[in-house]
Structures are given as C-alpha cells and as structure tokens.
C-alpha cells in the first residue's frame, strides 16, 4: 500500500496559520469546513468572501476602500479586483520597523551584511528621496541589472514606494538578453553592478554594461553598485544619462513615504524566457501580487515573524520577487549570490546551520545534483530549525522526494511548487496541514480553480491533460507591456480553451487532491499518437547513476515521431551498448514501451534558460534544422551546436 512520505502531527496542524485561517473562516461565516479540501472548495466557490478573508487575516490596509471585491464578465480575462481600492506594496513589506533582522546578504566569498527592519526602512527612505529628485514618479520604470543582494531589495522598495514599476535582470544575462527586456520597457533609472562573483571568479561587467547603455536612449540616471569591483568609477561608463555610484547617490535616514496606488497599478514587469522570440513583458499589479504572496507565504508555507526564509534564486527569476514578499510577514530573508556548489556541494547546506534557516527553497535540479554528489546533510549538519523545503523550476522526481526524507531530514514539509512568471506565484504548492506523497505537489492553491482538462475541455482525475485555471484570480497579469488591444496576452493563455486560462503544463490530478506535472505541453512527445510528458522519462533516467542529466525530444521520422534521449554522463563514463541497454530497461520497467527512446546520444552539455530550465523546443528546432529565434535567452547557447547535424539522427 502506497504510504505518504511525511504527515504532520495533529499538534503541528493545529499550530499552523492554515488551520487558524480555516477556523476564522468557519467562525466568520457560520461554516463547518472540516479540512483543507473543504476549505479549498469553499475558497473557489466563494472567491469574493475568500479574498476578503485574506485581506482581513493579513491586515492588508487600503487607504481608499474598494467598491467591491470583484467585478467580472462572463469569461476570462475580464476581472477587476477590489475596484476603487488604493494601497502601497512597499508599505506592506516595511510594516515591521524594529531591530529584528530583515535581510542577511551572503556573498560567494563569504562576505555577510545584515540589515534590521529599521535599517532597511532608513535605506529605503534615503534612496526614495534621491529617486524622486531624479524625476521618478508613478508609472516610471526603474530597472536593475544586479546580483541578489540587499541593494537590489532596497532599490525595489524605494521605486515601488513611489508608485514606480520595478524590473530586474541578473548579471549572467547576455547583452542582447538585457536589451531585449529593458529595451522594451524603457526605464528612467538603471541600478547596475560593476562586477559580480560566480564559481570563484570575479566577472567584470563594465564592457557588457556599456554595450547595454548604448541601446538605452531613454535612460536618465545610472546608479552603479561596485559590488565585486570596488575600484569602479563613474568614468568607466559611457552614456548620456547621469552616472553616480550607489554610495554617492543617496544618504540613508528618516522614514519613507508611500504613494497610494490603485489595486491593479503595474508593480513588476517580468519576462517570458524568450527562447522563441523577443521575451514577452508580463505586467503584474500591486494588489494582486501582494494578496497572492501573503496567502502563499503565510498559509501554504506557514511563514511567521520568527522564521528565516531562503530561496536560491537570481534577480532574473520570479522566485526573487516571491522571496522578497516574505518581508510582508515580518520574517528574516537570507539572500545568497554565487554558485550553489562553490567551493563545495555543501555550500548552501552550511547556510541552513549558520543562519538558522527554517524554510529553504531551491530547484529540483539542485536536489538531484546534491544527491549525485553523494551529500547526506542529515548526517553532516544539524538542520535544527529547518521545517520546510521548497522545490521548483521543474518537476521533482520520486527519487528526489525519497532522498530528501532519507538523507536530509525526516520531519519536514517537502513542498514541490509550480506556477510561474506568468502569475508571479503558484497554481499548486505546499501545505503544512497535508501529507506529502512521492512525486506529487501537495495541493491546489487556495482561491485558485485549478483543474486538469482533456482535449474536449472536460475535467479529468487520474488522467493526463492540460493544466487550467477555470476562474479569475488576483495575480493574473494586468497586461503585457506594449500590447494595447491585449491580443498577445489573450493568445498566450486563452486560445486553447476560450475564456479559460490554459497554463501550458501537461499535468495530472491525483486521488489525494495533489498534482503531478509531466512537463510542458509544447514539449510533449507524441510517438504513435500517444502523448508522453518529458518529465516521465527524466524521472527514470535520474535513477541511472552514470547519467548527470538528460533532455528528450520527439524527432519527426518515417511519418511518425520517435523519442530521442540526449544524456550528459559523469566524467570518464562512455555511452556503450551496455549502458544504453540499461537506460532503456530502467525506462521500460517503470513506464511503457512507448517511453523507451529510439536513440540515445551522449552530449557534453545541455542548453538551459538563464533560470535553469532545459529547453526541449530549442533542441528540437536545431535537430530539425529550424532556426532558434533567441539564443540570448539561454545561459549556454553554445550548447545548441552539439545537437546540429548529428549523423546518429540520420538513420
């Protein structure tokens, strides 16, 4: 009998904010919702009462009261949430103002800087005054080309306190990748690092930054954070904009003021990965982002004022935006910039003990790599305060679930979470009151009418299909930038099933009410007309000790599609007949004969986006001799050449 890997004790459940919220809803509305499934069903059937309950539970403060919770038309997208309400995002993240640590910034070289909530507010107030003096106001864009450090958070809070819109890229983006993003949104101010560290190297950004500046005619102010290049001077940078070093641009001190904004005022601009063309600029609103994040942090993650939250992310991934919202709960955030495996595989695990991290966030790829490196943190580290481990970026394999409970910690809530840049949040995620089952995301998010639909648009359980959200939710994008009629926005999410959000994930709902993500819909393999999610194959290949990582595509062949698997092997391992046979046997034994690849080919690298996602579509295009429109969205675009004109694929 299949058993859960972990179940919370009744005492642990009763102590969670999720359970407190359930009890409050019961009391306010005269209900008897007994458990999470009942609470979720109520939250979807009564979205207005639910989101109002979130406002009250987390004390969201509107300076102007809303005329309603929700005004909507018959089909998506047609919602106005909390019309008439005004608020400020930064104000809610800075409500705590004492000496409790707000940010702990750790650099790869071991440098550590700490800001209390009071010090953070003082920094924001100073930067706010200088941004205002530079002409930044409501609706202006402030962009950052920055590592994950405290200055980036201060920049975001100062910009959004003024009603400006924030957007960020990380320094590992290529020149064209940054221009493709910031060139579209035309920021008034750019905050940029002069250098950063990765894998033991100091990387000078001067040349790259000058190339970017040449293509940003709208820029009025460049603020340079020397970071890993302390010798940087304003004279290093060529631009018609004013150039000032961070330390000279403002003086900390005083209390920040907060411009009150409409609920759907643009707060963040995030970007699609852009591997099939210029990235889409996805605009997220002030109120929807705040409500969704306090719900996810406070209820689904059980984040509290005495918790320490860490997520391994860069400023170019939406998990950075998600992480910083932890300030709204009064928690301590640990920011880390650098390689997670430098100088050794235990680097981030060391941080858990050193900083008393209670909620640790990472990627599925990191956990798989940690296991392949032979790390057993449960034996080598204390992990005393660790109560939850979050994983996203790609589906977490069954083996990684088992690894966490066997070799990291037996008593913790392992939450595989999924949503994305498109909603700056999650459709399915963790839950401190529910058990954890191998390979499953624990639950659908509260207030999110998440379903799996077959090709006929009918909900299915225990079958694979398209992940949809059948009703409006507050963190739906306000719009795409420069898409006045909304044509690109509607095409992106509402063409598969008119009037219903289709997310592009190939998924399955389980009898436990959880979800399994089988990969991206557009990467689904179709041999003999049978749909196969790539994650189903990766899950098996990860069991093979000799393979570090893999990528599977469908190759058009002989009026059908055949499955081709590319593998990156451990050093010194050769892909001989015996290893190929072993890989095929593992896949066949645990899936179906249709999953077994027709060809297995060894490669030395696998292309990924800058946020670490493997790019099946780009590889498929190269194999079929089609162009890849935007290689600058990739962290390692040169890897694509490994897949071009392969003789093994011509027979």
Image (cartoon, rainbow, N blue to C red):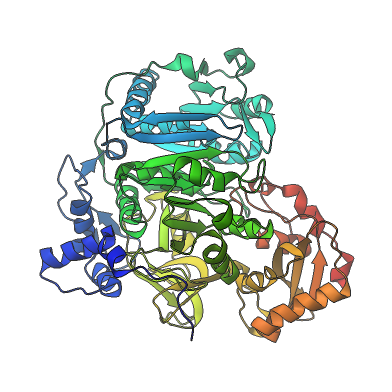
**x and y, in percent, of residue 530 in the image:** 63, 83
Viewer-side residue, 377 vs 575: 377
Q: Is residue 111 above or below residue 622?
A: above
Please tell me whether residue 151 is drawn above or below residue 68 in the rendered image.
above
532 left or right of 512 in image: right
Q: Quadrant of residue 250?
A: top left
Residue under the image location 65 percent in, 48 percent down = 345
Return the residue nearer the eye: 370 or 508: 370
Residue 233 visible in image: yes
20 or 629, which lies in front?
A: 20
Determine whether, in the image, residue 117 is placed left or right of residue 3. left
Which residue is rendered at x = 73% and y = 67% of the image? 545
State the image coordinates of residue 628 (x, y, percent, origin top left). 70, 54
Q: Where residue 182 appears, x then y in whole percent?
A: 53, 36
Looking at the image, residue 148 lies above or below residue 352: above
User: Against 534, is 307 above or below?
Assistant: above
The number of callouts visible is 0
Residue at 65% in and 74% down: 525
Quick check: can you spot residue 218? no
Residue at (55% x, 48% y) in the render: 349
The image position of residue 130, as x and y in percent, is: 38, 19
Image quadrant occupied by the C terminus: bottom right
Query: Is 483 or 238 nearer to us in this picture?
Result: 238
């Amino acid at each position: 009998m299949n058993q859960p890997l972990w179940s919370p004790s009744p005492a642990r459940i009763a102590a969670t904010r999720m359970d407190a919220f359930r009890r409050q809803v019961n009391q306010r509305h005269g209900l008897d919702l007994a458990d999470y499934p009942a609470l979720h069903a109520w939250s979807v059937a009564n979205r207005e009462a639910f989101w109002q309950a979130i406002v009250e539970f987390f004390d969201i403060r509107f300076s102007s009261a809303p005329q309603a919770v929700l005004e909507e038309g018959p089909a998506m997208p047609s919602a106005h949430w909390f019309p008439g309400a005004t608020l400020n995002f930064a104000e809610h993240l800075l409500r705590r103002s004492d000496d409790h640590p707000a940010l702990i910034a750790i650099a790869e070289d071991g440098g550590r800087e700490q800001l209390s909530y009071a010090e953070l507010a003082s920094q924001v107030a100073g930067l706010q005054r200088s941004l205002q003096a530079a002409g930044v106001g409501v609706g202006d864009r402030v962009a950052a080309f920055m590592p994950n450090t405290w200055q980036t958070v201060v920049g975001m809070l100062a910009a959004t306190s003024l009603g400006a819109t924030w957007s960020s890229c990380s320094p590992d983006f290529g020149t064209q990748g940054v221009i493709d993003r910031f060139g579209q949104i035309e920021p008034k101010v750019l905050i940029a690092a002069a250098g950063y560290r990765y894998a033991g190297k100091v990387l000078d950004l001067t040349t790259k930054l000058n190339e970017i500046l040449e293509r940003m005619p709208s820029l009025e102010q460049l603020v340079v954070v020397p970071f890993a290049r302390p010798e940087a001077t304003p004279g290093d940078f060529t631009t018609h904009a004013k150039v000032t070093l961070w330390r000279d641009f403002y003086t900390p001190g005083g209390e920040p003021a907060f411009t009150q904004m409409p609920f759907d005022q643009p707060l963040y601009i995030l970007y699609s990965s852009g591997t099939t063309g210029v990235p889409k600029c996805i605009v997220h609103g002030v109120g929807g982002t705040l409500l969704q994040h306090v719900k996810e942090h406070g209820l689904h993650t059980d984040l509290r004022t005495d918790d320490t939250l860490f997520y391994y992310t860069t400023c170019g991934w939406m998990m950075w935006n998600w992480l910083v919202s932890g300030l709204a709960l009064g928690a301590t955030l640990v920011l880390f910039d650098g390689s997670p495996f430098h100088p050794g595989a235990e680097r981030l695990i060391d941080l858990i003990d050193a900083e008393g991290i209670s909620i640790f966030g990472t990627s599925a790829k990191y956990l798989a790599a940690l296991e392949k490196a032979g790390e057993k943190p449960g034996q080598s580290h204390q992990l005393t305060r660790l109560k939850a481990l979050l994983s996203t970026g790609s589906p977490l394999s069954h083996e990684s679930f088992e690894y966490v409970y066997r070799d990291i910690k037996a008593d913790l809530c392992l939450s595989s979470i999924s949503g994305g840049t498109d909603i700056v949040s999650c459709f399915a995620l963790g839950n401190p009151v529910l058990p954890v089952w191998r390979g499953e995301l624990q639950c659908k998010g509260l207030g999110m009418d998440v379903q799996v639909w077959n090709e006929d648009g009918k909900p299915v359980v225990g079958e694979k299909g398209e992940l949809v959200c059948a009703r409006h939710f507050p963190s739906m994008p306000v719009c795409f930038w420069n898409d006045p009629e909304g044509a690109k926005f509607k095409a992106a999410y509402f063409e598969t099933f008119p009037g219903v959000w289709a997310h592009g994930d190939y998924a399955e709902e389980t009898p436990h009410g959880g979800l399994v993500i089988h990969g991206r819909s557009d990467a689904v393999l179709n041999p003999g007309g049978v749909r196969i999610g790539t994650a189903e194959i990766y899950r098996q290949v990860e069991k093979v000790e000799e393979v570090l990582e893999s990528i599977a595509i469908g190759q058009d062949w002989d009026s059908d599609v055949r499955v081709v698997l590319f593998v990156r092997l451990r050093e010194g391992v050769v892909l001989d007949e015996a290893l190929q046979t072993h890989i095929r046997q593992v896949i066949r034994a645990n899936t179906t004969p249709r999953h077994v690849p027709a060809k297995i080919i060894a490669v030395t690298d696998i292309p990924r986006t800058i946020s670490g996602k493997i790019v099946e579509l780009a590889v498929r295009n190269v194999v079929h001799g089609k162009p890849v429109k935007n290689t600058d969205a990739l962290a390692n675009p040169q890897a694509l050449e490994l897949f071009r004109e392969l003789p093994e694929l011509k027979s």
